[in-house]
Amino acid sequence: MTALFFLLALQGAPEPRTAAVGRVTVVAWPERMSLALALADAADVPAEWPGLGRRDPGPLRLLVAGSRTEFERFSRGRLPAWGAGLAMPGARTIVVRADAGDPFRVLRHELAHLALHEAVRVRVPRWFDEGWATWAAGEWDRLDALGLHWRVARGAVPGFRELDAALQGATGDADAAYAFAVTAVTELARRNPSGGLEPLFARLEAGLPFDSAVTLTTGLPPDRLEAAWQRELRRRFGLVSWLMAGGLWVILATLPFVLLRWRRRRDRRRRADLDVGWPDPGEDTLSPEWEPADAPGEGWKQQGR
């Protein structure tokens, strides 16, 4: 922590304070210390994790930031600007941003990362790491986003490599990527006889590489699992699903505005066509070559030249 305080002092920031709650060391600025203590209480208890069972978090350090600037000071710019939390398993440290959503849910997500990396020493892909942590944190509302249905309906289904990159992308892409990652992990769980992740985690905890563990657990190598997951996504979140999830109401709500705009453009073109060939309003409306006949009923007669 001395190095952290030295870094903050160089940046001209006021010095945060520390406190201990059980095995959790809290670091926060005074105005956020009460929230930090409540988060520490929540962190210092064993928790149930899908596929891993009940796990004791052990000693850890919890840093609570109140703004993006403070978050970047703690994380040293390792995450995109939209980041709300950071887990550093090697240092057993979690950073939570208090102004970016529910801090307790952010904490749960980051604790899931610590639990995963404490149990599994082999490397796992980013999509699995983030998808499982999102599942473990109960962030199912990500799947309710109409944007996910729309992306699938228009064919924007990523592969696992594209998913890894999107998880570090811009805000909109990252939101969809987290939702996709959850569906990939649940598909992985569905593809084994138990319908859960326990068999996969048992192999990973034994030190088996991720790809080998997936193949033995599901009977599918990662590339075939990816294809099966994409097919399942199209079935669950395709055009019909998008319409049922609310897309039809979006269409019905916007249709009157589209029709009104189209009609105005059509009427402008018609008025422009009618204006072509009409005489200037300042000129006589009758041609000088014609004049009324003297006798009634004779109609019009042409002037001789």
Image (spheres, helix red, strand yellow):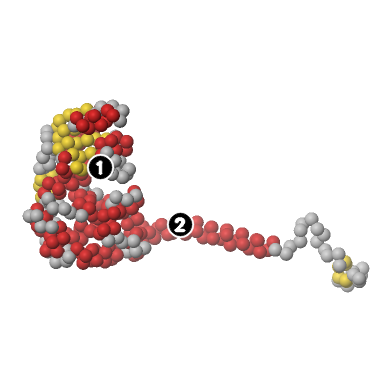
One can see residue 198 in this view: no
Residue 282 vs residue 222, the one in the foreground: 222
Crowd around label 2: few <14 · some 14–19 · many ≥20 (10 Å): few
- The residue depicted at 86 percent of the width and 70 percent of the height is 300
- The residue depicted at 20 percent of the width and 55 percent of the height is 125
Q: Quadrant of residue 35?
A: top left
Give the vertical position of 272 relative to 47 (above or below).
below
Q: Quick check: 186 left or right of 235?
A: left
Q: What element does badge 1 sit on?
A: strand
- The residue depicted at 34 percent of the width and 48 percent of the height is 171
Q: Quick check: 27 left or right of 118?
A: right
> Which residue, given by chain and number where applicable, does mark 2 sit on?
254
Q: Amino acid at mark 2?
A: Thr
Q: Which mark is residue 70?
A: none
Residue 158 vs residue 285, the one in the foreground: 158
In x, y percent, where is residue 63?
A: 22, 35
Residue 168 vs residue 225, the one in the foreground: 168
In x, y percent, where is residue 246?
A: 36, 57
Give the quadrant of the N terminus: top left
Mark closest to the chain's N terminus, 2 or 1:
1
Give the quadrant of the C terminus: bottom right
Number of disc labels = 2
Q: Quadrant of residue 253?
A: bottom left
Q: Quick check: 252 left or right of 238?
A: right
Q: What element does badge 2 sit on?
A: helix
Give the vertical position of 305 relative to 73 (above or below).
below
- The residue depicted at 62 percent of the width and 62 percent of the height is 269
In x, y percent, where is residue 161?
A: 26, 58
In x, y percent, where is residue 205?
A: 9, 53
> Which residue, given by chain and number where applicable, does mark 1 sit on?
85
